[in-house]
Every structure is written in structure tokens, then in C-alpha cells.
Image (cartoon, rainbow, N blue to C red):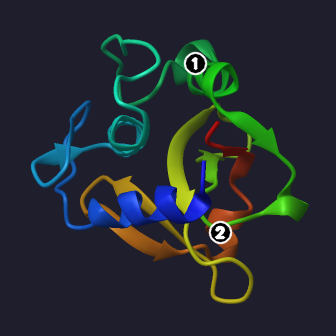
């Protein structure tokens, strides 16, 4: 799938309010909801139904639910092959599970990513050093 198409669709969601477990452009989305919405726009039906989940993403049990799902449906990439449209999976703490997603926008100096962020909605944010060091994995859409 073209990274340009992925990024264009992700950017179309900017301004969508943050809503936990939602995935409706313009109405509400969380980070997974954004990714699900981009998937639907590009492929039609989602690859699997998503059960209810808590905002902590099973962190107390240290269960890598989101990482396993990404590995089932996306193509792992090396950071050296970074490109717009890549799916970024983040650990919010160095010893925590991966529980946040975004889509790479600009690459290199001035890098940015699109994500649904609690309290902000879907935004394009700088991929600053604090965010970059939290990247746990990078994927491409199939």
C-alpha cells in the first residue's frame, strides 16, 4: 500500500475529537480507532473485530496485546527504511507495554506523526526526541 495514500487518509482525520474505543472520522477516535479508520478507507472491512479494551491496554498484566495484533496484520519495518505512512507503535514508559499508535508523516529533520491523543484529538505532532525514543516498532500497511 502506498505510504502517500495512508498518510493522506490519516491527515483527513485531523481534528477528530478523542473518544476512547471510537473510530468515526469527525466524531471520535482513539489511536487504535484512527488506525482502524485508515484501514477501512484503504481496504474495506477491518481484518478482525476489536474487543472492548481499557485505556491501560492490559499494562498491569504486561500483555503485549497491541504488538501482537500489529504483527498479525502489518509488515514489520526497520527504522532505516522509515517512510511516510508507516505505523508507529510506542511504549509510553521504557518498561511498559506498547500501547499507543501513530502514522508517520514527515521523515528526517522536522519529523512528524499523526495520532489520536487524549485531551487533544487527532493531531499531527512533532516526532520529538521524547516521542522518538518511545517507538517500540515500525510497520507498513500490507
x and y percent of residue 21 in the render? Answer: 26, 30
The residue wearing badge 1 is 65
Left or right of 41 in this view: 88: right
Vertical order, 38 against 128 (above or below): above
Among numbered discs 2 and 1, the one appearing first in the sequence = 1
x and y percent of residue 112 in the render? Answer: 56, 75
x and y percent of residue 6 in the render? Answer: 49, 55
Vertical order, 25 against 9 (above or below): above
The residue wearing badge 2 is 130
> Around disc 2, counting alpha carbons within 10 Å, would you say few (fewer than 14), some (14 to 19), or many (20 or more)?
few
Q: Secondary structure under badge 2?
A: helix
Quarter of the figure with residue 107:
bottom right
Q: Residue 83 shows which numbered tag?
A: none
Q: Nearer the viewer, residue 28 or 99?
A: 28
Q: Going 69% across and 54% down the picture, which residue do you hit? A: 134
Image quarter (top left, top right, bottom left or bottom right) of the C terminus:
top right
Left or right of 65 in this view: 11: left
Q: Nearer the viewer, residue 5 or 86?
A: 5
Amino acid at each position: 500500500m502506498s505510504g502517500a495514500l495512508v498518510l493522506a487518509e490519516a491527515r483527513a482525520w485531523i481534528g477528530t475529537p478523542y473518544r476512547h474505543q471510537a473510530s468515526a472520522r469527525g466524531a471520535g477516535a482513539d489511536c487504535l480507532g484512527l488506525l482502524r479508520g485508515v484501514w477501512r478507507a484503504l481496504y474495506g472491512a477491518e481484518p478482525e473485530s476489536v474487543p472492548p479494551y481499557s485505556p491501560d491496554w492490559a499494562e498491569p498484566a504486561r500483555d503485549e496485546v497491541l504488538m501482537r495484533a500489529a504483527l498479525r496484520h502489518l509488515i514489520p519495518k526497520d527504522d532505516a527504511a522509515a517512510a511516510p505512512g508507516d505505523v508507529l507503535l510506542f511504549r509510553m514508559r521504557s518498561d511498559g507495554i506498547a500501547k499507543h499508535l501513530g502514522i508517520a508523516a514527515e521523515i528526517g529533520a522536522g519529523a512528524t506523526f499523526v495520532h489520536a491523543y487524549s485531551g487533544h484529538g487527532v493531531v499531527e505532532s512533532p516526532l520529538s526526541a521524547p516521542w522518538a525514543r518511545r517507538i517500540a516498532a515500525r510497520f507498513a500497511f500490507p
